[in-house]
Image (cartoon, rainbow, N blue to C red):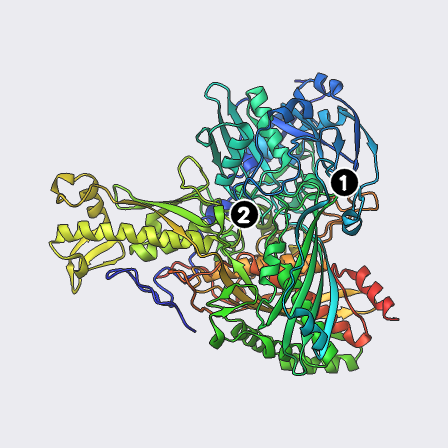
Amino acid sequence: MTAVADSPGAAAPSLAGAAGRWMGQSVPRKEDPRLLAGRGRYLDDIVVPGMLHAAFVRSDVARGRIVRVDTEAATALPGVRAVFTAADLNPLVHETWWSMAGKDAVYAPNFCLAEGDVRFVGDPVAIVLADSRYVAEDGVDLVELEVEADDPVLDVDAARSEGATLVHPELASNVASAIPKADVPGLQETFDSAATVVSETFVQHRYLPVPMETRGLLAQWDPFTEELDLWAATQSAHELRAFFSRLLGIPESRVRVRTPDVGGGFGQKVFALRDEWAVVLASKLLGTPVKFVEDRRENLIAASSARDDRMSMDVAVDPDGKFLAFRAELVENVGAYPFAGSGSAAALVGMCLPGPYTVPAIGFSGDAVFTNTTGRAPYRGPFLMETVVPEQIVDVVARRIGMDPLELRRRNVIQSSQLPYQLPTGLVYTGVTPAETLEQAAELIDYEGFRARQVAGRADGRYFGIGISLCVEPSAIAFGALSTEGAVLKMEGTGTFNLVLGSSSTGMSVETTMRQVAAEYLGCHIDQITVTQGDTATTPYGAGTQGSRSAVLYGNVTREVSLEVRDKILRIAAHMLEASPDDLDIADGQVAVKGVPQAAVTFEQVATMAYQGTAMLPPDLRAGVEAVTRFTAPMMTFVNACHICTVEVDPDTGQVQMLRYVVSEDCGQMINPKVVEGQVAGGVVQGIGGVLYESFVYDEVGNPLTGSFVDYLLPTAAEVPDIEYGHVESGTSNALNVKGVGEGGAVASPPAVFNAVADALAPLGVELRGTPLGPRQILDALAAAGH
Amino acid sequence: MPEGDMSVSMTVNGRERTAVVEPRKTLADFLRQDCALTGTHLGCEHGVCGACTVLVDGQAVRSCLVFAVQGEGHEVTTVEGLTGPDGALTPVQEAFRAEHGLQCGFCTPGFVVSATALLAENPRPTDDEIREGLSGNLCRCTGYQGIVNAVRRACGRADANSSGSMEVPA
């Protein structure tokens, strides 16, 4: 294992890859006591005087003309304060673009409420404001909505065809964004001359983020100051603030966004959806606080969709099993109102397609297509097709050429000795260890031993399978609004610290891990540090907690701001101790002269000098100990993992039983190993759920069939195995030596599960071409193979 | 009393609570709104996710599927009622913390209540019994790893975890 040397200055700690006093320790979470005791505060727990509750009238037709919306009976209901439709709210909309996507991205039309027609089942048509959620829902029932249904656009291929009905008549086409086929010199010749070419098309079905807390916000428009005070269950308070200032056409300084405890997000809570705009506009129209907490049905059918794409891929292989070229074509179903921009992840999929392998030539193209379904929003690893399809087709190649899939990966995986490694797409890998994680995972799961048991099992009519997924993915993607985070660190008058970050944690343990980083670099106990986050009035601008960026962005800016404060502490202590800063050590909240531990001052004494003994400070030292700084990350911080799992498939019932699940991952220096493993496990189980249980389904007219947890099946504790972990801690290009680990589990797990099931069924001649892999799909595949 | 509303009394966390409610008000909303006990969370309101689990006369019950008026005369314990008055966590809660059995914390009260009820009924559950006993609660963050380990730890099993618990370094 290697590590990037740390060089923050003479007196600063150098971790050089090893665990420190706080870094690398599984410190118990600061967040936990309140959350365990039921004393967390989530959006729906916030009550303010005069607050109204919102509920929405939504379309139950996928596409059609609004003939009539009659709100009279609803408005007359006691307890209902107002009912608004598009005519009331849409004219109040100014601009509706997001910092992350930019003003000039392609956006779906910016209707707040459906105007003239409806474009998916769940499309918000009217908002009812009432004294309680119960009465608001009564009001919804009394609104008469008449829609003349029309044939919806559901199929991505029909949607792209000549003369197709338009999802958005305001736009020229149903293609939301496209990456055209590029003419890659020599690519076709490589395929023409290769010993073997394998071509497959894999479908990834629609499955959803499903945070346990649904979306919600509490908008408080003050008509006297013309300011918006917004509580929001969001992953990105600052992005929301910028957005709502544009929506309302007021300066950003007149919008404050605060985040309470947030019950998960997984990407769905980065952006505010159209119904949330309506809540803010309703508060403005009424001059009254308005709260909206969506119910689970709304969350499933109307919040946002994810996955739902298809990729065709060709692989050219030489006689030794070496990959010569990858060529892929991606089609994404982005629904009617994707956020933000086109909702496409194709650019990243194309750039990252080679993944962990040395592939000399790459071709890629993609279309993102509007349909009359719920719009796509980010979901944990939105670019995962870069891993899902290549990893699945690698196993097909292995079967086709008669080579074990582990051996095939060994022949093609990028070795550490090849770093820095430039992909044909232009990206340059540094600090990745795909070969090491492949070997570690294979050893952990006893790959050879399993293969032997698998053969023995087949003799007994039992179908065991093993699936590998090897993944290099970009964490902390840092372009535009995502590129930077700031931090403020203040030593308080008693020698404790307040660390202020622009994050909006939705379960990522930011309060704990960032205290660990700060304590390490300040040289004090974590209990001397509090973290403030999730309030745009007090925290520096930042894109928030998403995209596997917290460790890289918040971690590094916390390190830098801590070192600045540490330097000031040293200089004041040097003055107090009549020594040179270079001759001082900091530990446990004390500054002492090296080798003379009795010559020491505490942080409290330093703080007293800094804030009260100002007359005694030399002229070159300003009063106070506080720092503001900002970190800008490199464009991508690559992170890698290898997942290997084993399953047993029952060919009579189509049931898949997970047996073992092993993850070897390299996220650099772990700040808190338990938190890292928790992130990995959460992602893995979302992938297991996605492949085996979860599937969001529409009927032939675009009506959702899976609008409850009775139909949309999340995995429970009874379905998942114990996950086993291996860690490789290699170096990377940032000074804290960390890589983001939030998404990787969800990116690498679907193809691992898929490959294991496919491996189990391969002796029966079954070929699987996509997910989900519920009993129905497996029995169908068996039947197609003649069983 | 508004027409149709009903008066309801029950013991909640050892304290007598009386309120006038609509008959359709759920026990969960009564606890959250009338008793200001917001630790009971609503994740689905159709009885699947288990975030709203409370104890009614010692039995784990989904408070979104029960009307407040059905609580008349019963003894209800919410997650807030498990913790000591000084904020001291119970062994189950401590085990969740040590095993990283929670991330966002939204499902956590329901799991803590369910695990407490499970262990009261079966102090030494097998792995299968733990998994089955928790299968009425959904978590989207942890992949259930830390949760299952927490219950193993809470009943004193040595195999609670594979990689060490969370402890403040000495």
Give the amino acid at mark 1: Leu
Q: Is residue A640 left or right of residue A198?
A: left
Viewer-side residue, A311 vs B89: A311
Q: Nearer the viewer, residue A706 or A641?
A: A641
Res A269 → quadrant: top right
Q: Give the image location of residue A252, x and y in percent.
A: 46, 32
Determine whether A574 is above or below A416 in the image.
above
User: Residues at marks 1 and 2, common chain?
Assistant: no
Residue occupying image coordinates x 50% and y 65%: A428
Residue topped by disc 1: A166
Give the spatial CA distance, label 1 vs label 2: 43 Å
Amino acid at the residue labelled 2: Gly
Q: Quadrant of the N terminus of chain A?
A: bottom left
Locate residue A209 relative to residue A167 in the image: left or right: left
Instruction: Name the residue carrying label 2.
Output: B105
Determine the chain carrying the residue at label 2: B
Asked if residue B123 can be seen in this view, the reply is no
